[in-house]
Structures are given as C-alpha cells and as structure tokens.
Image (cartoon, rainbow, N blue to C red):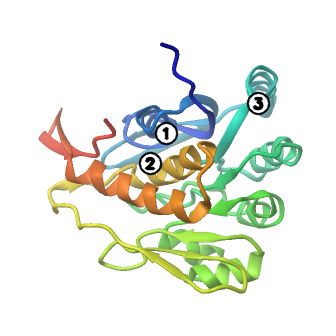
Amino acid sequence: MTTKKPVILSIGGSDSGGGAGIQADIKTISALGGFATTVVTCTTAQSLSGVSDVHVLPIDHISAQLAAVFASYDIAAIKTGMLFSKEVIKTVADYLSVISCPVVIDPVMVSRSGDQLIADDAIMAYIERLFPLATVVTPNRYEAKRIGSNAANQLADLHGVPFVVKNTDEKHTDKLGFPAESLQSYSGKNAPNSVHTHGTGCTHSAAVATFLGQGKRLQVAVQEAKSYVTECLLSSCEIATSSGQIAVVNHA
C-alpha cells in the first residue's frame, strides 16, 4: 500500500555532528511522516561542544539547489535554518516570495553553546526580506533579543507576523504571539539534566513546518511540535563520544 507524504523543504546549514541543522531537520520530518528535501546553504565544523568553522556555499550553487527542488517537487511547507549572510538571505527570499505554501523562518543566529551563526550585517536582511514572507518566525530567547524583544507578542506586533519564542524561561515554555492578539503559552515536561539539548531548536521548527505541511492550523502545529520535542528529550538515546556515553535528542 502506497503512503502519501507531504514534501517538506529544509533550507539551512549542515551540522557535521549530526544533531542539529539539516541533519536534525531530515530526522524530524521523516519521523513525523513527511518527505524531506533540502537546500544546503553552509557547512559547519561542529560537535556537541560547539562550532569551530563555518563555510558558506557559493550563491550560484545555493540558487541552483533551490531551482532544482522547486522544479521537481510540489512543496507542502518550508523551513529555513542557518542562512548566515545577507546574500544568502536575499537569494532565499527571492525564491520564497513567489510560493504559496507555509513558511517557517527559524532565524538561526546564536547556538546554545553561544557561537554566533550569522554575519553582523545579516539581521536587517532577515527583518526586511524574510520576516514578511513568514507564516511564523521561531527564534529562541537569545535570538529574539537580538531581533528586538524577548516577547513574542511585541515581536509579532512589530513585524506583522506570528512569532514563537522558544524556551522563554527556566521551564522551557514556548510563547506564540499574533499581531494585535493575546499571547499563547506552550509548556512541556522538563527533560533530565543529563540529556544534551543540542538541536532542539532546529527540531522544533522542522516539526512546525511538517505539521503545517500536513494541513494543521498554526496553533495546533506549534503545540504538537512542542510535544514532539519534549518526547524527543524524554526518550533520549545514548551515543558514544570521545568523552564517553552521552544522552542526546532521539528523533525516532
């Protein structure tokens, strides 16, 4: 029996450590019943301890990837992750401006380990070119502050699109704000402190995109994405590292 799957496009960076970025997106989309397609914008040398190098791919190659995917697939939803430079952001925005499917913009700027994942002059390109195209924007609390506020409703009012600010407090609460509307909170069970949370931001935004691609309303997609990330943490798996066994996010 043939199973019908929505095609979800992830546009972002490659994580050589396998826990975040494009790799986390593919795992998430596949686990939630989508068919993952990708456009790689940059490669990173990173592990669970941080990012040591970033290489941005040539703009012509990024554009060629975008053209190939859009020409071949009926995309149900899109998420963007690490874009890094204003040139990449503008290239991606040119393609997204002519599509009609849901778009989740995850403005990857700062990793959980504190590494900067965006050029200093690229934030305004996000605000001017990508935010207006978004179905929802999903910064973590550190990225939200760099954009201009920690509050989801204030960001929504300022930019005219819904914002989910992830992990707004020590209880890992996500808050969804709509322009000129009330704020909605989404909480989950706290994961054990022994679980490494690398990649949960990418996992969350990829899950939101997948649920939107399945036709779910934004509020439902955000709630189910929160529940999925919580389950990924609570059902963590152990992997062998040079420092010994470590519990990590389990996308299965």
Alpha-carbon span between mark 3 and mark 2: 22 Å
Residue farthest toward the front in the current orientation of the protein: 1
If you read the primary sequence from the N terminus, does the residue marked by circle 3 or circle 2 appear first? Answer: 3
Q: Residue at x 43, y 47 (%)?
A: 51
- Decide: few, some or many residues near mark 3? Use Cα within 10 Å; few <14, some 14-19, many ≥20: many
Position of residue 157 relative to residue 98, above or below, is: below
Does the CB distance between marks 2 and 1 fall below 8 Å?
Answer: yes
Amino acid type, residue under disc 1 in the picture: Asp
Label 3 secondary element:
helix
On the image, which quarter does residue 46 sit in?
A: top left
Amino acid type, residue under disc 3 in the picture: Leu
**Residue 240 x/y as whole percent:** 16, 32
Q: 133 or 244, which lies in front?
A: 133
- Decide: few, some or many residues near mark 2? Use Cα within 10 Å; few <14, some 14-19, many ≥20: many
Q: 117 or 219, which lies in front?
A: 219
For label 2, the residue is 203
Label 2 secondary element:
helix
- Decide: few, some or many residues near mark 1? Use Cα within 10 Å; few <14, some 14-19, many ≥20: many
Alpha-carbon span between mark 2 and mark 1: 6 Å
| Left or right: 208 as drawn, with respect to 233 | right
Mark 3 vs mark 2: give the one in front: 2
**Residue 218 x/y as whole percent:** 60, 61
Label 1 secondary element:
helix
| Left or right: 111 as drawn, with respect to 212 | left
Q: Which mark is residue 66?
A: 3
Q: 119 or 34, which lies in front?
A: 34
Position of residue 15 relative to residue 101, above or below, is: above
Q: Which quadrant holds the C terminus? A: top left
On the image, which quarter does residue 226 sit in?
A: bottom left
Amino acid type, residue under disc 2 in the picture: Thr
**Residue 54 x/y as whole percent:** 55, 41
For label 1, the residue is 25
